[in-house]
Amino acid sequence: MPHITTAHNIQWHYEHSGSGEAIVFIHGFGGSSRWWWQQKEFFEKAHHVITLDLPGHGESTWQQISLHEMAMDIRHILEALNLSQINLVASSFGGLLAMELYRLIPEHISRISFVGAIPKFARSSSYPAGLDIEKIHTLSQQFEGNYASILDIFFRSLLTMKERESPAFKSIKELRQAENLPQRPALKAFLEILEKADLRDRLSSMICPVQFITGSDDYICPKAVMEWIQEHMPNARLDFIEGAGHLPFLTKSEQYNELVQNFFIN
């Protein structure tokens, strides 16, 4: 399987398939490139699909690294693959990385589709979204114990009860059981980034077409913050998937894929 070692001494695992316009998929906290398997099968028929494991996730190695350094590494990977123009699809934490990557190479990014992603994940009195900071601290502390169990509980909280009772959930469980657990230091470092990152000022500088897809029952990205985003990015496209939580690309893949495809071709 392809790997690229970057200047930050991280061996990034990536896969690419198909041909045509390039789409780079960036997963979120605690995930891996394998989470995009349904999108890979769908989009590789007409696109060059690139999926990658973030540091300390999947098959990528871990070194302490900042959000900006991760974006620099992805730029290096794109250069190594001779990709001069790309579309981005980013989930949750991956959305922060996509925003940072856009800041580095705006001229090389044609469109960005976010799913369950917002520019700030730490909730505050003036920002009704994301996670309570104390809960972020608690989660980080819990990872000192049986972090596999804690990660599983957190993952289940991202799905609605109906999603957890759906036939798709069995496949999702099998997927997670078959993949490598994220490395504990990576999870704790990512939580620190989630707590501190505030990229709200980036929205006004994004001039490429942007889409935000959100589950109607996503407690991290509620409709209130989507309305805030639309106020600050009036040209952004907002799509809601009814009955979905934070990861609709896993649980309602057909509807999700159609929304992304429609955004890319229009």
Image (cartoon, rainbow, N blue to C red):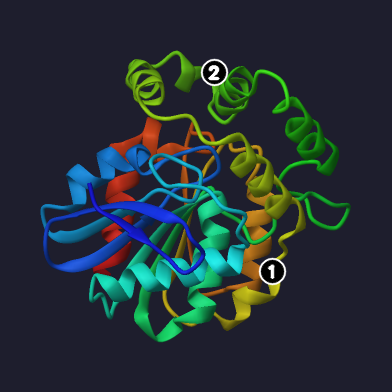
At a point 38% along the width and 28% down the height, the residue shown is: 179
At a point 61% along the width and 20% down the height, the residue shown is: 153
Residue 69: image x %, image y %? 56, 68
Name the disc covering residue 216, or none: none
Residue 101: image x %, image y %? 49, 72
- Sequence-wise first label, 1 or 2: 2
**Nearer to the camera, 2 or 243:** 2
Q: Which residue is mark 1?
A: 200
Q: Is residue 78 above or below residue 239?
A: below
Dot 1 falls on a residue whose secondary structure is: helix
Hey, what amino acid is under mark 2?
Met
Hey, what amino acid is under mark 1?
Arg
Name the disc covering residue 161, or none: 2
**Nearer to the camera, 188 or 29:** 188
- Tell me the crowding category of disc 2: few under 14, some 14 to 19, or many 20 or more residues within 10 angstroms, Cα based: few
Q: Is residue 55 visible?
A: yes
Residue 61: image x %, image y %? 46, 47
